[in-house]
Image (cartoon, rainbow, N blue to C red):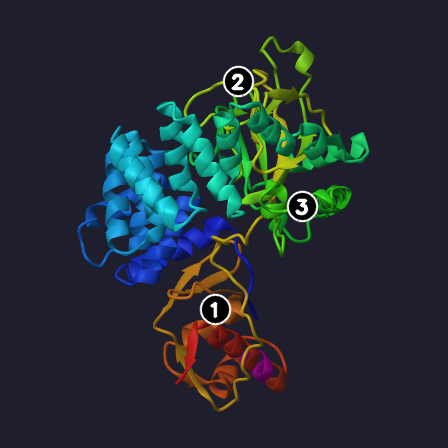
Amino acid sequence: MLSVRQINREKAGELIRAAYRLDPSHPETARRLARYLFATDALEELVGNFKSKLDTPELDPECLHYVGLAASALDDHRLAESALSRAVSKGHAGSRGPWARALYHLQKTTEAYSIAIQTLEQNLEDDWAGQVVFKTLLAEGRRAELWNLCERLRAASVWTSRAVSALALAAHTPEQIAFVRQITDKDVWVEHRSLGLAPSWVRQFAANLALSDRWTSLPRVKATVGGGKRIEAVHAVVGDFWLDSIFRHIRGAVAAYVEKRIDLLASRPHDQPMAAMKPVNPSLTGWVVSVNGNGHEEWHIHPDGWLSGIFYVDVPDLSISEAPHAGQIEFGPLPLGASMSVAAWPRWMLQPRAGDLILFPSFFAHRTWPTHLEKDRICIAFDVLRRGVESVTAAPSPGCAPPKIALDERVSRSGRAVFLPDNEGWQLIMNVYNGQCAAVDDAGALIWSLLETPRTAREIASLLLRDFEGRQDEIQRDVSEALGHMVNCGLAVVA
């Protein structure tokens, strides 16, 4: 009769947009919309919704933050600077680093560096500020100063993913080069092997993935460019035989990787970034990328990750491609503004095949080379996260058992709920403020419609008996449970 369940991003988006239309002035509603639009690459819609409100005092600083990030991704750095500076003035500390980056893109390098270095002094782990500081020092040839800054971070056991690349680009003495080579040794930290699955099984998995209805276009805030598509959050898909099996094997490979390096991971944090960044409660997130033609990954790292990996589901016959390094993955330091080869961390490549798994530290920068072939190269990428990951779907399950609604308790709709029909036979209801959702069938939808006027469970059950077959006591019990779920989600209230 009523199901509280996770819904896909498209359905979540419909509800979030409807909630915003219902109450655009409520800060949490606006924040939820901004987060959703940014996470789903609806950047123009995000900017269009909030750009005209930049100067209004009621616009939430988190919304300003996401407007700034979206504008940066759209290369509108003036709008980005305007939105992010306003977010900072309203107390959003997380906007300081992106603000410095926007100023850097506007070639206001002195102001950008000043803000970034102050931000880094206050929060050594601010990755955005670190980017601006590292790039500025490298561009100005201040390599010794950059090395000393990274040493201060290291002494505080504060490693960031980009700091390792900065060390590599700053290293110039034999001792410095030797240190960087030790912490980036590919023979120690990179594994390239088969996941041990039968080729026929992998081919069937590839065919199954190709039929998925969850493919979306490539997001512009990620590193993949050119021809391709993507499936988000495959680690969270429940009940899919193929994905369950793949991630079971992946988790086993990760556990074996850690066990093999247990002594290294017990090193002093200021000597070893993998030891310093190792998560206490690791969680795993994954996504699928399919590219063809000129599709490829530009140089990037996974700043939220600790250990990253790629499982290659399907790789075309690269022998027929005339493209240089077709389909290869290349590792090395993140360029940080200038593409260069450095002695401390020489670049190198791997040629993956279908069924292969590559595991590597998340601070290892990498890029892929396009195949220039029509056939897709499909892989599952994943991170073992340093911290938790925020979900952008708007359907968290209730955290406790629903309250029992007595038959004679009067219940009414919450004024904070929005209702949408669904073309799959369900009706969707969402609490505007807390984001919790319920998916209801025809009977549940009828209960919801009857709650327009406050009613008891007994009264509703009596009305349902006219349209549904069943014993009175069973229908009363079902109505009581449905109302309990609605109250628990904040969709209804006891009058």
Q: As drawn, is 391 to the left or to the right of 244?
A: left
Q: Residue at x 34, y 52 (%)?
A: 93
Quadrant where the C terminus is found in the figure: bottom left
Within 10 Å of disc 1 (Cα), the crowding (few <14, some 14-19, many 20+) is many
Query: Residue 161: image x %, image y %?
Result: 52, 39
Chain-order first, disc 1 or disc 3: 3
Q: How many marks?
A: 3
Q: As drawn, is 146 to the left or to the right of 361?
A: left
Q: In the picture shown, does residue 409 fall above or below 468?
A: below
Tag 1 secondary structure: helix
Q: Which residue is mark 3?
A: 267
Amino acid at pointer 1: Ala
108 or 469: nearer the viewer: 108
Query: Residue 345: image x %, image y %?
Result: 58, 24
Chain-order first, disc 1 or disc 2: 2
Q: Which residue is mark 2?
A: 341
Which numbered disc, 1 or 2, marks the residue closer to the eye? 2
135 or 15: nearer the viewer: 135
Amino acid at pointer 3: Ser
- Whole-Å distance between the Cαs marked 1 and 3? 58 Å
In the image, which disc is placed on residue 445? 1
